[in-house]
Image (cartoon, rainbow, N blue to C red):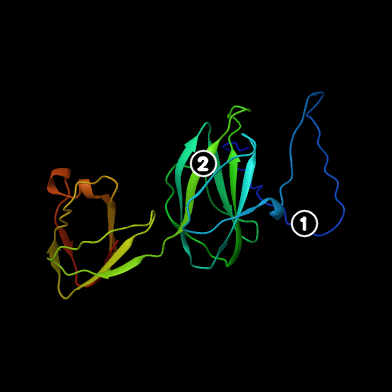
Amino acid sequence: GFDRIFDGFDHLALAAGTYTLTVDFDGAATGDIAFRLLSKDSAQTLLANTLTAGELDLARGSNLFKVFLSQGDKVYLDGQALAAGNIGWRLIDPFGVRVKASNTLTDAVEPFVVNTTGDYWLVFDGSNTNALEATVSYQFALNQVPDISETLVVGAVSSGSIDLAGQATVYSFDLNEASQLVFDAQSNRSDLSWTLLGPRGEEVTNRRFDQSDTGAGFSVLALPSGHYQLT
């Protein structure tokens, strides 16, 4: 299971040999204990961009998945469903370093880039507050989400679609002279946002489409000449 305090303990990289594991209570406390050590043999192979559904074999236990990722892959965990309890998750790189984590599978976490090529462990941890006899089920996909590159023409309507959860479209354009521009959202969606990067850095950061007009207090953009990317 998991709690909400991370102590840096994720992964043991052990050489072959004989080990002794000792369990002890604090002070004079007594009682039952239960735990297990999971290895790569316990891991289910995971295919990126593929919907996976299943159940925790223990409501407060952990399930392991193994997935191969390459350096530079942009990744998004799309937690689609969770029932009868809570599950936290951690992604651990081939060296045992935690790359990303969340206390709830269905909470949205921004896409991230991995820095190492190799087998990663995705660990699902049943919450310590789950009922012991509960059947905790889940549905998710670990998506590889490379950016889609497009060219933007100032003044023309840009249209398209994002079909993979966590993916983004990057529109590039150039201004040959200092200009004033207005973002015309053409949509009132609160789950769609945009960022504008130019020669001065970020001009706009994660602004929602439904908050991008004058009614939301968003004014004209006064931009210098140069190269821009709108994501």
In the picture provided, is 181 more to the left or to the right than 30? left
Q: Position of residue 186 (x, y in %)?
A: 16, 53
Residue labelled with disc 1: 14
In the picture provided, is 148 more to the left or to the right than 57? left
**What amino acid type should be assigned to the residue bearing mark 2?**
Tyr
Residue at (68% x, 52% y) in the render: 11
Which of the two labelled residues, at mark 1 and mark 2, occupies the earlier sequence position? Answer: 1
Q: How many marks?
A: 2
**What amino acid type should be assigned to the residue bearing mark 1?**
Leu
Q: Position of residue 107 (x, y in %)?
A: 44, 42
- Which quadrant would residue 196 be assigned to in this image? bottom left
Q: Nearer the viewer, residue 135 or 143?
A: 135
Residue labelled with disc 2: 138
- Residue 47 appears in view: yes
- Residue 200 appears in view: no
Label 1's element?
loop
Quarter placement of the C terminus: bottom left
- Find out whether the residues at labels 1 and 2 contact each other: C-beta distance under 8 Å: no
In the picture provided, is 34 more to the left or to the right than 163? right
Residue at (17% x, 44% y) in the render: 216
